[in-house]
Amino acid sequence: MGDQKEVRELTDLPGVGPSTAQKMIEAGFASIEAVAVATPQELSQVTGIPLPTAQKIIQAAREALDIRFKTALELKKERLTIKKITTSSRNLDELLGGGIETRTITELFGEFGSGKTQICHQLSVNVQLPEESGGLNGKAVYIDTEGTFRWERIEQMARGAGLDPDEVMENIYWIRAVNSHHQMAIIDQLFDLLKRENIRLVIVDSVTSHFRAEFPGRENLAMRQQLLNKHLHQLMRLAEIYDVAVVITNQVMARPDVFYGDPTQAVGGHVLYHAPGVRVQLKKSRGNKRIARIVDAPHLPEGETVFVITEWGIRDPE
Ligand code: GTP
Ligand code: MG
């Protein structure tokens, strides 16, 4: 950036005075990060700023956040700094190449009761562990769209991990997303929380339920997918800019009779079908056993593994 003024506030961006900044904040572009991921069209539309000015503002925000060409070697070095959160199952960790990755979106998809929410609870606890125990010494954000978050379960899992339950619960920020619009607005606001707090994990459980309910059927598919893509894009930027792990869940029916083709092809599709990330398919097995499988991750070997859901949380089978 040379001797240019450092960009910290909206008003540090070129062409943004206090009144423009106010308009941007009201329209949800309250941070440099939010501006950097906006399109010139939307920024111009909601604020009345001319399009070329909006382009300049966004460009400056991106430069401030170091969104630019990188060399392959830089990419390699960045890859090596990706951290991992343990799932408390060695099997599952191995399948994931060491655990749930930061700067990545991991999609857990599977039928009801397959363990998606349980893994999310476990990760909210485990992210708090010290690094040598498979954690990141950080806090978690839990965006709950179905009302299935249980602090009682966190308490149990914290005990299972040998941590102080109250302390663990204090480090999990829970919010109920009441509809898809709210769900997306929460992510916009998160940019601010992540700047202030040492949050290393963001969970959206489930990422799809509101979108499915609000945009049902084939006739709404295009709209639903468009909004979901926008939401995923938000989450991807969040993961990258703040070096956090993002975990999303997606309920799919395991009923091969209701659709054709590959039975692992989720009904409604994997959310991450067109986005980079790790997709983990979960299936029920006998009793408390669950099967996990990685679906087309370029850097992970194919294969499946078994874990169990116990009173104390996710574990390896005996
Ligand atoms: P949907 O959200 O309905 O799509 O399912 P999900 O994939 O999120 O399932 P979830 O993670 O909620 O798994 C539910 C299963 O976890 C239950 O059927 C139980 O087998 C297990 N489980 C949940 N709570 C406990 C608990 O307190 N103790 C034990 N031992 N198992 C539990
Ligand atoms: Mg669930």
Image (tube, rainbow, N blue to C red):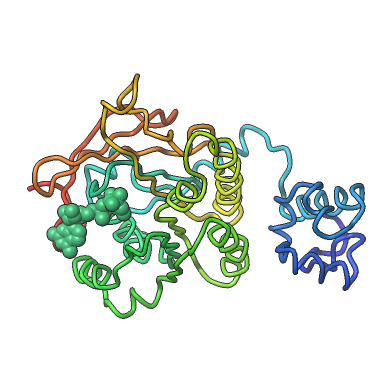
Give the image quadrant in which the ligand numbered 1 is located.
bottom left
Q: Is residue 116 visible?
A: no
Q: Nearer the viewer, residue 26 or 192?
A: 26
> Left or right of 117: which side holds 51?
right
**Residue that extends furthest to the top in the rendered view of this protein:** 261
Q: Is residue 34 above or below residue 20?
A: above
- Residue 199 is situated, as x and y percent measured from the top left of the image, at 49, 65
Residue visible at 53% across and 32% down in the picture = 274
Residue visible at 43% across and 35% down in the picture = 268
> Left or right of 3: which side holds 87?
left
Residue visible at 16% across and 49% down in the picture = 308
- Residue 126 is situated, as x and y percent measured from the top left of the image, at 32, 61
- Residue 238 is situated, as x and y percent measured from the top left of the image, at 58, 54
Q: Is residue 82 visible?
A: yes
Residue visible at 44% across and 67% down in the picture = 176
> Left or right of 229: which side holds 80?
left
Q: Nearer the viewer, residue 97 or 266?
A: 266
Image-quadrant location for residue 222: top right
Image-quadrant location for residue 311: bottom left
